[in-house]
Amino acid sequence: MRRYSLVILLAIAIFAALPYVLPTYYLSLTTKILIFVLFAMSLDLLIGYTGLASLGHAAFFGFGGYVVGLLVVRGQVSEWIALPAGVALATALGALFAVLALRARGSYFLMITLALAQVVWGIAFGWRTLTGGDDGLPGVKRPTFIVSLADENSFYYFVLLMVGLSALALVAIVRSPFGHALRGIRESETRMLALGFNVWRHQFAAFVISAAFAGLAGCLFVYNTRFVSPDVLHVVRSAEVLIMVILGGVGTLLGPAIGAAVIILLEDFVSSLTQRWLLILGIVYVVTTLFAPRGLVGLYRDYFSRNRKR
């Protein structure tokens, strides 16, 4: 636990110095990377530590963002209320999804989460009078916490603080007895049942916690873009974050963070050359599955292990 915490604190210190050396565009890109780092780590708690592969995680990401957008733009509610409300309602949605989805396993669980997420996307897309439909909701003001977060530097530090605290919390969760129980459930549910663990309750808690952190990432994303549309709920968003987790390395937390940075940087580079981003994303998934099934972190560990044996 201490080693992981030190790594996170060192990373925070390095990121804290970036506004002094990066131009505004790259600082904004780094802010986006941090947000998706949190998003990917939240999904890794569900996939890597609980063994539940979801293709509907964008529902919590987008729902939290929509709550912020609707409260700020439509309701003229203070940003002090909008942010925690977005996280709280995304968590509640996660609880509802968990009750419905945890009845299934494997590919059935994957398809149920996809179907539930598509319902949320359909509501956001079709309820034009409330959500703006495919036009979205522009004009989402950034919050003011002691100081205004309207400029890129102050908002960057706010996102860094939120992501850093969330990362420490996730490390504490996965290193706790609860986290070890989740690993046991991932390996063998029947064995954990025989040992007296309430498997469903642990899976439910992991699902809800994962949804809460995804909702926080969605709120930060909408504040960053100052705009929310059905794209934040789309299945492509769920697939994108799933590839981030797989690319970096499932069940490591660090791996999904690396995967998120690689995918966002690759997307930024590819988008400047072509609009075929989804094709590139598919190729990344295929290559990773074939040549690095344990992700970049697993690839590094295998390479390090071979060198030690030599």
Image: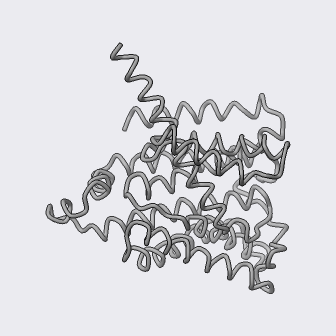
Query: Which one is in front, 85 or 262?
Result: 262
x, y percentage for residue 65?
68, 67
Asked where in the image residue 188 lies, by quadrant, the reply is: bottom left
Residue 120 placement, left or right of 181:
right
Query: Which one is in front, 247 or 264?
Result: 247
Q: Which residue shows up at 83% across the image and 41% down it?
A: 25
Residue 197 placement, left or right of 155:
left
89 in relation to 261, above or below = below
x, y percentage for residue 168?
47, 45
- Count the labels in the image: 0
Q: Which residue shows up at 37% across the image and 77% down it?
A: 103
Q: Which residue shows up at 40% across the image and 66% down it?
A: 106
x, y percentage for residue 294?
45, 41
222 in relation to 25, above or below = below
Could you tell me which quadrant the N terminus lies in? Answer: top left
x, y percentage for residue 266?
71, 41
Residue farthest to the top, as pictured: 310
185 in relation to 234, above or below = above
Could you tell me which quadrant the C terminus lies in? Answer: top left
Residue 279 placement, left or right of 296:
right
Q: Which residue shows up at 47% across the image and 79% down it?
A: 96
